[in-house]
Image (cartoon, grey):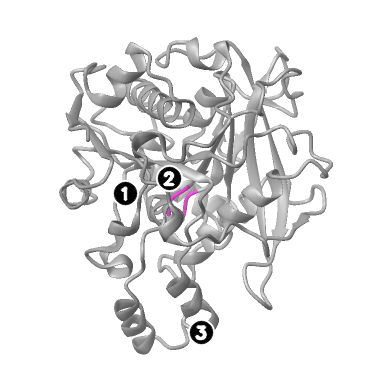
Amino acid sequence: MRALGCVLFVNWMLLGCSSGKEGGSGPEPVDVDVSSRAETSLSSVSDSGIHGADTLDTHQSSEIVSAPVDEPGPHQVGYRTIPLEYAPEEGRTRVLDLHLWYPTSQMEGDHPIYEKVFPDAVSLVGAELLNEGPEGGFPLLIFSHGHRGFGGNASFLMRHFASHGWVAVAPDHTNNTLTDSSDSRETSMYYLRSLDMRAVLGFLDTSEGTDPLQGKLAVQRVVMAGHSFGVDTGWASAGASFDMERINERCAANPDEDGCHAGGLKIFEDGLRDERVISMIAMAGSIDENFYGSGGHETVAIPFFSMSGTEDPVGADLQYERCKDMDFRWIEFMGGCHQTFGFGGCATLDDELGFNLVSAYALAFARHTLMFDESPEVLGYVDGGTIASEKIIFHGAP
């Protein structure tokens, strides 16, 4: 499949599929109440550096922090989807399909095909969750796909984390996926996607549900990753401030656009910081000045690790220059394209090499920020002491 170019993949999907959601005729969606979501002020965001807040049960286990980050972990990978329903604002309901990858000891089973096109020959559909998790719960990675993407867009990364004992979850951002989105982005998408991530964490942060994962995850401190437009979602969840002057100008020019109503503007004004997100992996994307202005990043106090490809000019260089006062790292992949961080098909960088490098750097950063892993291997990846490939250009550590 990777031999096909990205354009062929997209054209095939748009022409051949009427619905990309797995489980569309599956179980009824779970209803989640996000009315008590994490709504703390930006003044309470920790400024304690790369580790974020320092009041956490680090839930370390020897397996999770000892396996080499550049190799698959010791576990097999289970996968399934869950429909989730929630109300992001009054009078509005969203139904999301959640994709979940998790460690399992099961050795055989059926494999998923994402969006009915992209096969995954490793993950096992419906496999049982690993019997014994680390004290404090399984560490959690949450992922936001790009514009017209899908939850399984970076399944290689989700599998890598799950094989190392993490749980990885990625919602399909309804009305902004490969099969249900227009070319344009409604204003509301700049806040709905972050509210999607809040709803996911709210759903997982309970021991009263019927799902096997509920009550077994360390949900109060999580690592977030995003691809392309998912990077903007990450900035919002990390606490970036919206430029209300620019948003009001946009809405004045397009008053009927979804998100330009009073309630939507209030959400932008209040911000979308979720303090459960303690670090961010930004892949093939950069902060959108049209929504955040030139200084929206200044209210962010969590570590960022940015990755981009030299064949994919997404403004990562400008983002890095702007964010040098933050806890912010940036690596470039020589020959990397937009889908080096997605489903592959890059003609200028081998897919497997790109996927392996993305996975190793992301896992090292996640282990360091969430688990305080300061092993020489992890520090080498995080601070640039180890350059894993001649294809990597490392741009500074704080």
**Residue 259 in view of the camera:** no
Name the residue carrying label 3.
261
Q: Amino acid at mark 2?
A: Gly
Query: Any magenta on residue 22?
Result: no
Where residue 151 sits, quadrant-wise, is top right
Instruction: Provide residue 307's location: percent of width, then percent of height.
Output: 29, 37
Dot 1 or dot 3: first in sequence order is: 3
Find the distance from the CA under tag 1 to the CA under tag 3.
28 Å
Query: Crowding at label 2, few (<14), some or many (≥20) Cα neighbours within 10 Å?
Result: many
Q: Nearer the viewer, residue 65 or 360?
A: 65
Residue shown at 70% from the left, 62% from the top: 86
Secondary structure beneath dot 1 equals: loop
Q: Is residue 207 left or right of residue 255?
A: right
User: Is 246 above or below relative to 88?
Assistant: below
Q: Amino acid at mark 1?
A: Gly
Name the residue carrying label 1.
285
Query: Crowding at label 3, few (<14), some or many (≥20) Cα neighbours within 10 Å?
Result: few
The reply to whether dot 1 and dot 2 touch (C-beta < 8 Å) is yes
Find the distance from the CA under tag 1 to the CA under tag 2.
8 Å
**Stretch of the chain drawn in magenta:** 145-149
Name the residue carrying label 2.
226
The reply to whether dot 1 and dot 3 touch (C-beta < 8 Å) is no
